Image (tube, rainbow, N blue to C red):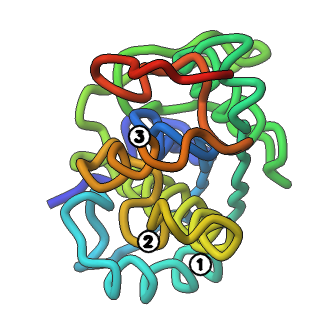
Amino acid sequence: MLLLRYSEFELECGTDEAGRGCLAGPVTAAAVILPKGFKNKILNDSKQLSKKKRHSLKPIIEEQALSFAVAHIFQEEIDKINILNASILAMHQSINQLQTTPEFIIVDGNHFKPYKNIPFETIIKGDSKFLSIAAASILAKTYRDNYMERIHEEFPMYNWKQNKGYPTKEHREAIKEFGVTKYHRKSFKLLPEQLALEF
């Protein structure tokens, strides 16, 4: 059973990211403040849910949240500042876009940098412990997946519609055959043996 609050604060915001381990596309974060008394029996860590369930929860979260926001940090920025900093920046940007300023922030994982002067707590596997982090994980995942499905149309040979930019065997084979695109993260090891990739 996921908990609604970690702190005593009513305006507690949960934040999480998606796409950290991908070879292409943005890292996407979401921030969600849920209302007092919020309940949902299906809501869980996005990785535990089917695509269908994630997509059915997305409008429920957006409708019932006191405030929510989503931010993408794209591959050029990831290459400049590294994926960890980009993930934290995406979380900061999503919190920044909230219409309500949170009083406390709970973060999935164990890395975060202070945001303004708002107290925060990092929670390992937070997306399977707290509803607001689970809600953020679902929004981050669904918004990022939608983006990857759109850019799939431009470069269908990488099958991002299916693999969403993750380092699947098929994705690596396509990089080997067709090279890299403007959407690939050039700072990542795109092929295990770095087969003479020309940047």
Task: Look at 71% across and 61% down and name the residue there.
Answer: 67
Residue 120 relative to residue 97: left or right:
left
Q: Is mark 1 on a helix, strand or loop?
A: helix
Residue receiving disc 2: 38
The answer to whether the residue labelled 2 contacts the one labelled 1, judged by CB atoms less than 8 Å apart, is yes
Vertical side of 10 occupied by 113: above or below: above
Check disc 1: other Cα within 10 Å, few if <14, some if 14-19, many if 20+: few
> Which residue type does callout 3 highlight?
Lys
Task: Look at 50% across and 41% down and name the residue there.
Answer: 17
The x and y percentages for residue 154 are 70, 69
The answer to whether the residue labelled 2 contacts the one labelled 3, judged by CB atoms less than 8 Å apart, is no
Instruction: Select label 2 or label 3 by which is in front.
Output: 3
**Mark pair 2, 1: CA separation:** 8 Å
Vertical side of 124 occupied by 142: above or below: below
Task: Look at 44% across and 14% down and name the residue there.
Answer: 111
Between 154 and 80, the residue placed more toward the observer is 154
Check disc 3: other Cα within 10 Å, few if <14, some if 14-19, many if 20+: some
User: Any mark on residue 104, and which?
Assistant: none
Residue receiving disc 3: 176
Task: Look at 53% across and 49% down and name the residue there.
Answer: 178
Residue receiving disc 1: 64
Q: Is mark 3 on a helix, strand or loop?
A: helix
Residue 133 relative to residue 118: left or right:
left
Q: What element carries label 2?
A: loop
Vertical side of 184 occupied by 121: above or below: above
Q: Can residue 70 be seen in this view?
A: yes
- Of mark 2 and mark 3, the one earlier in the sequence is 2
Residue 58 relative to residue 7: left or right:
right
**Mark pair 2, 3: CA separation:** 48 Å
